[in-house]
Image (cartoon, rainbow, N blue to C red):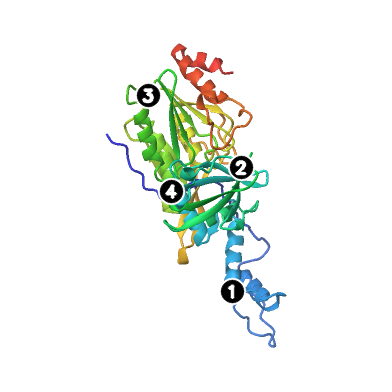
Amino acid sequence: MPKGIHTLLAVAAGAVLGAGLMLVRGVSADRPAAPLPASAPAPRAQSSLLEEVTRRVSNDYVDRVNGDQLDRAAVEGMLASLDPHSAFLDASEYEAMRASTTGHYSGVGLEVAEKDGRIVVVAPIQGSPADRAGVRAGDVLLEVDGRPVEAGRLAEAIGYMRGFVGSYVRVAVGRGGEPEPLQFVLERSDVRVRTVRAEPLPGHFGYVRITHFSDSTARDFGQQLSRLQEAAPLAGLVLDLRGNPGGVLESAVSVADDLLDSGVIVRAEGRSVNSRFEMRATEGDLLRAAPIVVLVDHDSASGAEIVAGALRDHGRATLMGERTFGKGSVQTVMPLADGQALKLTTSRYFTPSGASIHDRGIEPDVTLVAPPGATATGPTDVTGDPTVRAALQYLRDRSLGTQVALAGQR
């Protein structure tokens, strides 16, 4: 039976919004109000606090502020008061989020991050314009089209490199051992972000790393498992979710579904009808019950925690690494006018056992401290990574029994 297709349009992320009631005592509902003095003016309709403050700022603030500025500031302040994950997205931010979830965008194909006060190339995406031109991991981004790249403005630098397919952008990078910056003229193209990486491990075991969950992740995951099992079924799988911040909820659920035959994967509770749901596995385990080790760390969050929690609760996988981040809610993205959007926390989710991991995270079955120099992009040498080696040894020891395998890692 083919695996089910989930259609919930939401982004897994997390926080919980609380509310309360205040009971005011000491006023009798039966006692009539005292009459107004004859000279008192008739009461006017009371304006809201927001309207009153907006009027004061518009009239009396030292500098003129237009209405659009005040509206946006009010919206941003309102959402910031709720939780860290609800936010207003302007058109460019919404487009960047859509690029992340769809798995492709128009640009040069550079994965960059801020490190030690500099914007550093983590890796060029394979086959992208930057990769073909020779930009390397570790290069320091200095300028984009003559504009200096500054620390603390990572999103701005990324925005400079994106644009229409076929347009050109000049990028200057610093590279160790080179006396002068290197200049690259790159033609923007449609870049596909690969979120799934797979490699065979000795003994017919497999390694799969998922960096985040985009719309294409579940399809790519299935294809990579098929490739690893072309010759014969895998004896076991190391599923690396370290540094995975989550992403598209339905994608994370589909990955868990590929490794389960039945049962609840995730349940969510919220105030609206659409925010209350339960997602279940369908028949068909792509690994045919072969054992799984899931690697997690402090940065494994949201969708990664849904997958890890579902596989562990159903006895399908052993978790190794560090306690996860603890994002226990779902954000729904709601399009607004002018290409803008509202990202609003609408649900809190629960693992199949009924546990909420919000602000708690998931404790691994086997605690392993991250090796020195570990990066969010995962190991460059998989078989040389101490955590992967420990997971592989556990899978080999499974032939002697689960308790023996666990004892060997403590």
- Secondary structure beneath dot 2 equals loop
Q: Is residue 119 left or right of residue 164?
A: right
Neighbour tally class for label 4: few under 14, some 14-19, many 20 plus, Cα within 10 Å = many
Residue at 27% x, 34% y is 1
| Distance of label 3 from label 4 (alpha carbons) | 35 Å
Residue designated by label 2: 175
- State the image coordinates of residue 23 (x, y, percent, origin top left): 63, 58
Q: Quadrant of residue 352?
A: top left
- State the image coordinates of residue 200 (x, y, percent, origin top left): 42, 25
Determine contact: label 1, label 2, CB under 8 Å: no
Residue at 56% x, 46% y is 112
Observer able to see residue 40: yes
Residue designated by label 1: 67
Determine contact: label 4, label 1, CB under 8 Å: no
Q: Is residue 363 left or right of residue 283?
A: right
Q: Earlier in the sequence, mark 1 or mark 3?
A: 1
Look at label 1 and name its amino acid: Gly
- State the image coordinates of residue 401 (x, y, percent, origin top left): 46, 13
Q: Earlier in the sequence, mark 4 or mark 2?
A: 2
Q: Residue furthest left?
A: 1
| Eye-nearest disc, 4 or 1 | 4
Residue 58 is tagged as: none
Determine contact: label 3, label 4, CB under 8 Å: no
| Distance of label 1 from label 2 (alpha carbons) | 47 Å
Residue at 63% x, 72% y is 54
Neighbour tally class for label 2: few under 14, some 14-19, many 20 plus, Cα within 10 Å = some
